[in-house]
Image (tube, coloured by chain):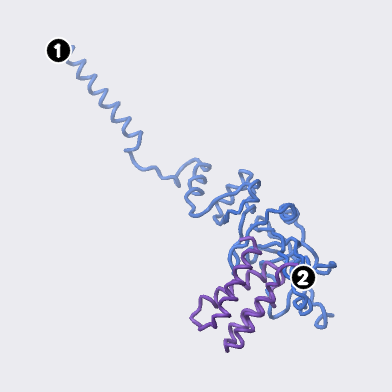
Chain colours: A purple, B blue
């Protein structure tokens, strides 16, 4: 069984929601919900995670660490 | 004496004339306009080389991880004329970054089928998912058993989907094929197809589930 990167993505979305960053939370969750191949979902998820990490928003350190770790793991699964 | 002097003078003038002719031939003459050439093949070649940031990859280089984009129409035309497969490229630009060609046997083998007109498929949710303009497709009909697991799609996505569509690649359109990664309990391994936006001709679109007929 491979690492469940979708669960990791949803966990980032949940932490963003708890931090009051509702729009970012929705964007991360939508990347998982609106993709229909694994490559589409994973590339979209990583892109959204990179967007939130590169934004000006004040991310909780735990959330930023999880987002960074998930984005890196996605890259490895995609063979990059 | 006079005759000898005249001969020397004539000889000097002939040498000077020859020298001037040679100088003109090797590059100090007027610039040659390639586009005004009367040799079409040479003209095409000059234009193709002048196109910025374009490279070709031979079909045998499919396993390479080099990202290549063939975007210049003249270059594509020339490549086609010389027998190089123009849609054999290593990467397709998507809205989320570059999708690279898979090096596994199944992905490479699928290329010929897709170039030969095999259908590609996709499921989605109306109002949320991309449809005809979508870039990510599968080589298998979504109705086939185990589809979600082979394509790494969460069960909830499949449950919420309400359309199935199929298409064929537009002739000459670049694309990549790659194995779907396994995620969680999904095994992955199905062959995905990534195309540029608008790279397919639609064959069918069906609304399924409660919204369908």
Q: Position of residue A47 (x, y in %)?
A: 59, 72
Quarter that holds the N terminus of chain B: top left
Quick one: SS at disc 2? loop
Name the foreground residue: B75 vs B139: B139
Residue B136 picture quarter: bottom right
Name the foreground residue: B31 vs A10: A10
Image point (21%, 15%), residue name: B7
Residue B37 to residue B164: above or below: above
Host chain of mark 2: B
Residue A75 picture quarter: bottom right
Which mark, residue B2? 1
Which mark, residue B185? 2
Marks 2 and 1, how far apart in space? 106 Å
Q: Position of residue B207 (x, y in %)?
A: 79, 77
Residues tagged by mark 2 and mark 1 found on one chain of the structure: yes
Quick one: SS at disc 1? helix
Image point (58%, 87%), residue name: A19
Quarter that holds the C terminus of chain B: bottom right
The outermost residue toward the front is A62
Please give left or right for residue A17 compared with residue B190 in the image: left
Image point (53%, 76%), residue name: A53
């Amino acid at each position: 069984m491979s690492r469940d990167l979708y669960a990791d993505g949803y966990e980032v979305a949940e932490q963003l929601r708890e931090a009051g960053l509702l729009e970012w939370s929705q964007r991360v969750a939508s990347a998982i919900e609106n993709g229909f191949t694994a490559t589409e979902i994973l590339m979209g998820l990583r892109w959204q995670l990179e967007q939130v990490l590169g934004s000006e928003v004040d991310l909780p350190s735990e959330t930023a660490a999880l987002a960074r770790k998930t984005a890196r793991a996605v890259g490895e699964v995609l063979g990059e | 004496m006079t005759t000898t002097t005249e001969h020397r003078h004539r000889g000097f003038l002939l040498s000077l004339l020859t020298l001037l002719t040679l100088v003109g031939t090797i590059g100090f003459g007027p610039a040659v306009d390639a586009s005004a050439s009367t040799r079409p093949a040479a003209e095409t070649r000059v234009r193709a080389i002048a196109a910025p940031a374009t490279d070709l990859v031979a079909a045998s280089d499919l396993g390479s991880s080099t990202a290549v984009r063939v975007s210049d129409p003249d270059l594509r035309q020339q490549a086609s004329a010389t027998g190089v497969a123009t849609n054999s490229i290593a990467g397709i630009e998507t809205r989320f970054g570059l999708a690279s060609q898979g090096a596994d046997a199944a992905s490479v083998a699928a290329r010929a089928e897709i170039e030969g007109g095999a259908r590609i498929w996709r499921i989605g949710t109306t109002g949320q998912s991309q449809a005809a303009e979508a870039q990510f497709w599968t080589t298998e009909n979504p109705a086939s058993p185990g589809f979600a697991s082979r394509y790494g799609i969460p069960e909830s996505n499949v449950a919420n989907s309400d359309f199935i569509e199929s298409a064929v690649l537009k002739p000459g359109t670049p694309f990549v094929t790659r194995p779907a990664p396994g995620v969680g309990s999904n095994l992955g391994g199905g062959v995905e197809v990534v195309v540029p936006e608008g790279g397919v001709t639609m064959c069918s679109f069906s609304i399924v589930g409660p919204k369908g007929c």
